[in-house]
Amino acid sequence: MRQLLITVFIFLLSSAGYCAPVFEILPLGVYGGLKDGNLSAYLLKTIESENYTALDSGTLVYGLLVAVDRQSVHNKNVEDLLQKYIPAYLISHAHLDHLMGLVMAQPELREQQTIMAREETMQALQKNIFNWSVWGNFGDAGETPHLNYQHYQTMPLLQWIAIPNTDMQVKVFPLNHGGMASSAFLIRYKTEYILYFGDTGADSIEKSTNIENIWKEISPLIINKQLHGIMLECSFLNSQPDNKLFGHLKPNLFMAELRQLAAMVNPLYLKNSLRGLPVVVTHVKPRLVDFSNAQQDTREQVINELSQQNDIGVKLIMPEQGVMLSL
């Protein structure tokens, strides 16, 4: 018993607060549908760098306009941001709410910029979007002719690779999104990490171990205070039936997955093993009632439901378009 108490005490000391911020996250779009000027897209960079990596791009140029207007980008203008400071785009999957901003802006991008995705996603982009029927092919592979404006790079799963023209690396993990291939990106800078999820269903619903496998990867990073945050989707309210989630999470499933992670980090002290860990809640799907009734706000309801079930003490963050986060 004495040894157990000492172990718990040492763990509590190590859990007291997270390390100083290393990453900056600029949300260009935060919703998972309907609000077509504010769809899933985030820019990520280290505090020491000027170059961003895009994590999905449902909204791009309009999100940059909002960020400039809110003075979140250190006196840079939209043209320079788009053409000079986002050398790489990591696309988690080929759904339009994660892609349309990039599609619309692609003719304005430059040759040194790289579009990156796992093989299944890259094939979907090249065959179904950049195919000269839906949109032109401004890249250097896929349907001919290639205009060679940008480089397409297919990313292997579960291997560290450099993100071009940044100081970061990425490891791609497979996710199940209602039968569609999706991705999570574990980003590394030196010995510091941040984790971004594309759309994903719960392991229990998808009959997979994809999220569990990611938790196994990151639990040592949490123990060592190397993981600065998790960006995880929560698309629906708890009232959404399980058979109508379409490969997404809702608050009770979101928290159940995080409790699994907490159990891996410290099964003896579950309620404190993730205490204070920043978790950015992404991809909430607004409802039409949000537009017609000022008293309705699905994002506020989602965060309320999450907070009510947050018995593990994670720091829930609801991002706002154009407002910088430091983690």
Image (cartoon, grey):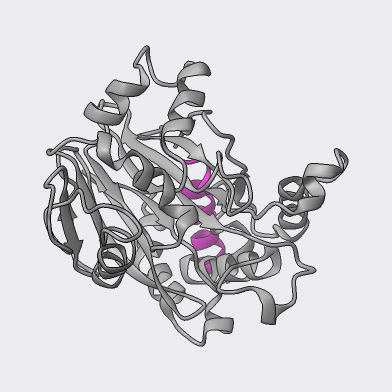
Res. 220 image quadrant:
bottom left
Locate the N terminus by quadrant: bottom right
In front of the other: 175 or 98: 98
Q: Please tell me whether residue 104 is drawn above or below residue 246 in the rendered image.
A: above
Which residue in the rendered view is the most extreme toward the top? 75
Can see residue 228? no
Residue depicted at x 64% and y 52%: 313
Image check: 189 left or right of 302?
left
Residue depicted at x 38% and y 38%: 43
Q: Please tell me whether residue 17 is drawn above or below residue 126 in the rendered image.
A: above
**Residue 147 rendering spot, x and y as whole percentages:** 13, 48
**Residue 298 rendering spot, x and y as whole percentages:** 75, 50
Dominant SS type (magenta): helix
Image check: 266 left or right of 23?
right
Res. 104 image quadrant:
top left
Locate the C terminus by quadrant: top left
**Residue 19 rendering spot, x and y as whole percentages:** 41, 38
The magenta stretch is: 1-18
Which residue in the rendered view is the most extreme toward the front? 133
> Would residue 4 be counted in the magenta stretch?
yes
Residue depicted at x 53% and y 28%: 323
**Residue 131 rendering spot, x and y as whole percentages:** 26, 62
Which residue in the rendered view is the most extreme toward the bottom? 207
